[in-house]
Amino acid sequence: MANTRRDVLKRGLAASGATVLGSLAGCTGTFTGGGSSTTVTAASMQWTEAELMGYLGFESIKANTDVQTENELALGGSMQCFQALNSGDISFYHLYTAGAYATIPPEHDEIPSDPEEVYQQAKQEMKEEHDLRYLQRANFNNTYALATRPGWQEDTGVETISDLAEHINSGNTDITVVLGPEFAEREDGWPGLIEAYGFADGAAELNIREIGANLTYQVLGESEADIGMVFTTNPQIQQYDLVVLEDDQNFFAPYNPAPLARPDDVASGSAIEDALNAPMEALSSEEQVIELNARIALDDEDVQDVAIDFLESEGII
């Protein structure tokens, strides 16, 4: 059977992590794609909200410009997409600001809590270090959070992460915590959180389980754990009646999506840039995005259809 364009691309982008980072400067790509001034190749990371962001940009470009578009949405992980962008195989994908700041060279150990500061620094470094353009960021924030199972907050009175720290430090360590593997290891995840909020000693006494990040919602909802890591715009928070603890010390970094693009494909002041920026300007709240995500993840609507419906409702197409 003949290889599809995506098959070839994915084989060429199979490396990740340190191997990918080490190859960025000299990567030539498997084929020439997305480099033409008359062709824009859209890509996205491979999860619901990221695909939604990609389709918003893809459909907006199709409706508002005369350029040829190619679809490489749901391409893979963030670093796979970044490598493809850096090598010219795609024209843009949506990268979340704190992710850009923390994982794309030059990496930073500490991330500012101000969303605009993170965005502006990431934007400057993308231009200076990689000759890439960071376009308009959306205002909604899809960041990490800690959530509790139904009823646990009422039983304990814990409403903030500071309350949780005090609760644990008071000797209440008979608590089951479920964490995604990455969150359990990252300094902007659990290890940094327990240090910042001052309950590292108490945390050592907790029953901590590492499970798939997408499973934490159901595990909490079925009362098989008390506290768990969630993402703030995931509709399963509402599906399972989970309660998000307030991050009252602003530990978790701001994650605002923004199109990251090649200057050759998305020129400053171009109609393509305007088409990519328009959906980001229209996305104004977490509640709005949760509703869109729910239509896809819970109601089984097609992500492309949801994107088109939103763009039509906002008068973008």
Image: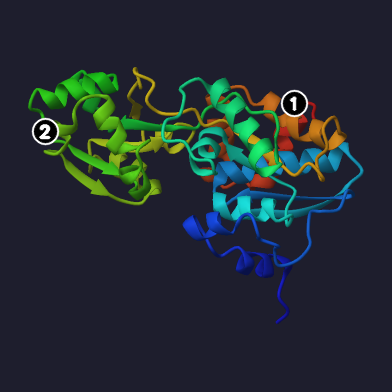
The answer to whether residue 44 of the structure is visible from this angle is yes
Viewer-nearest residue: 191 or 10: 191
Q: Secondary structure at mark 2?
A: loop
| Residue 266 picture quarter | top right
Find residue 194 and report its image quarter: top left
Amino acid on which disc 2 is placed: Thr
Dot placed on the residue nearer the N-terminal end, 1 or 2? 2
Q: Is residue 46 above or below residue 201?
A: below
| Disc 1, SS | loop
In this view of the protein, which residue sits in the foreground, 257 or 108? 108
Residue in view at x 62 percent, y 46 percent = 51
Q: Quadrant of residue 292?
A: top right
Q: Which residue is at 51% across, 39% downward?
A: 99
- The residue sitting at 56% across, 52% down in the picture is 79
Amino acid under disc 1: Glu
Task: Categorize mark 2 by other alpha carbons within 10 Å: few (<14), some (14-19), many (20+).
Answer: some
Nearer the camera: disc 1 or disc 2: 2
- Report the residue at 62% width, 50% height from top: 82
Q: For this view, does 65 lie left or right of residue 34?
A: right
| Furthest-left residue in this view | 171
Residue named by callout 2: 173
| Label 1 environment density (alpha carbons within 10 Å; few <14, some 14–19, many ≥20) | few
